[in-house]
Image: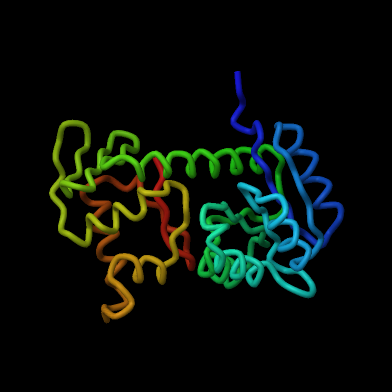
């Protein structure tokens, strides 16, 4: 049977050689093909050579930091579908927000635990595969929820849940990539648009209404960062 990790390439970028070796060992043990880079400039060169499906990118590096690497990768359509997950220290709230703002998909906090790392990496690949399937389908199914994009309807089992237009759009955005952290700025831009002025509490109010209608288990708050959908 083909494993999820067969033929999936991961590029690991960190200026600390012991972390590179640790990540490479644990990922290869799970069957992933692993390339490594020790700084941002080298990461860009190798990314173009190997076209990895996932890049694990340290934020704090000399010469070029991870945020700038991500910004440059996201400016090229070649990497539109590449998953980028950052490595951050637990207390780097500002760095985490900056990383997500430039197009990062997720972040993994240090110190890194092998089982959690592998679980997170596999979840990222599953999420991407599921997202690709959802793009082909007009209905997103997550847990017991069905979100019909064409008919603008939401069902929990057989029960239809009434939603306002912006509530539906917010739910659709979050559910389109379960597990992905969406920053508040990203939500504003994609749901309300950059040319619309709304109050600072607008997102909070809509999140609260969604939780009242769906239950509190689906939408998680990452304090100081944003929101993500889980099931």
The quadrant the C terminus occupies is: top left
The quadrant the N terminus occupies is: top right
Q: Name the residue at the top extreme.
A: 1
Residue ID at (19%, 47%): 150
Q: Colour scheme used in the picture?
A: rainbow
Of 132 and 158, which appears nearest the observer? 132
Of 173 and 73, which appears nearest the observer? 73
| Image-based side of 210 in relation to 62, left or right | left
Of 200 and 168, which appears nearest the observer? 168
Looking at the image, residue 96 lies above or below residue 36: below
| Image-based side of 96 in relation to 166, left or right | right
* Position in image of residue 14 (x %, y %): 77, 59
| Image-based side of 39 in relation to 122, left or right | right
* Position in image of residue 157 (x %, y %): 21, 32
Q: Name the residue at the right extreme.
A: 17
Residue ID at (62%, 49%): 54
Residue ID at (25%, 62%): 206
Kindly indicate the quadrant of the structure image that contains residue 201: bottom left
Total number of numbered discs in the rendering: 0
* Position in image of residue 60 (x %, y %): 72, 69
* Position in image of residue 192 (x %, y %): 28, 70
Residue ID at (81%, 60%): 38
């Amino acid at each position: 049977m083909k494993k999820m990790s067969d033929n999936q390439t991961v590029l690991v970028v960190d200026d600390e050689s012991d972390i590179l070796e640790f990540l490479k060992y644990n990922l290869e043990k799970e069957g992933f093909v692993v390339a490594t880079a020790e700084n941002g400039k080298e990461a860009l060169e190798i990314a173009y050579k190997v076209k990895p499906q996932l890049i694990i990118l340290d934020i704090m590096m000399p010469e070029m930091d991870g945020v700038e690497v991500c910004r440059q990768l996201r400016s090229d359509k070649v990497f539109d579908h590449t998953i980028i997950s950052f490595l951050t220290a637990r207390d780097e709230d500002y760095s985490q927000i900056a990383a997500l703002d430039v197009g990062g998909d997720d972040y993994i906090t240090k110190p890194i635990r092998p089982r959690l790392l592998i679980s997170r990496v596999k979840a990222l690949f599953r999420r991407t595969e599921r997202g690709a399937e959802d793009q082909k389908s007009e209905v997103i199914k997550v847990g017991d929820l069905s979100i019909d994009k064409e008919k603008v309807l939401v069902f929990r089992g057989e029960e239809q849940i009434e939603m306002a237009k912006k509530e539906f759009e917010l739910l659709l955005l979050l559910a389109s990539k379960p597990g992905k952290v969406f920053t508040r700025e990203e939500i504003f831009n994609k749901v309300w648009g950059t040319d619309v002025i709304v109050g600072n509490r607008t997102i909070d109010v809509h999140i609260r209404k969604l939780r009242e209608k769906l239950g509190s288990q689906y939408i998680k708050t990452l304090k100081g960062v944003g929101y993500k959908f889980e099931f």
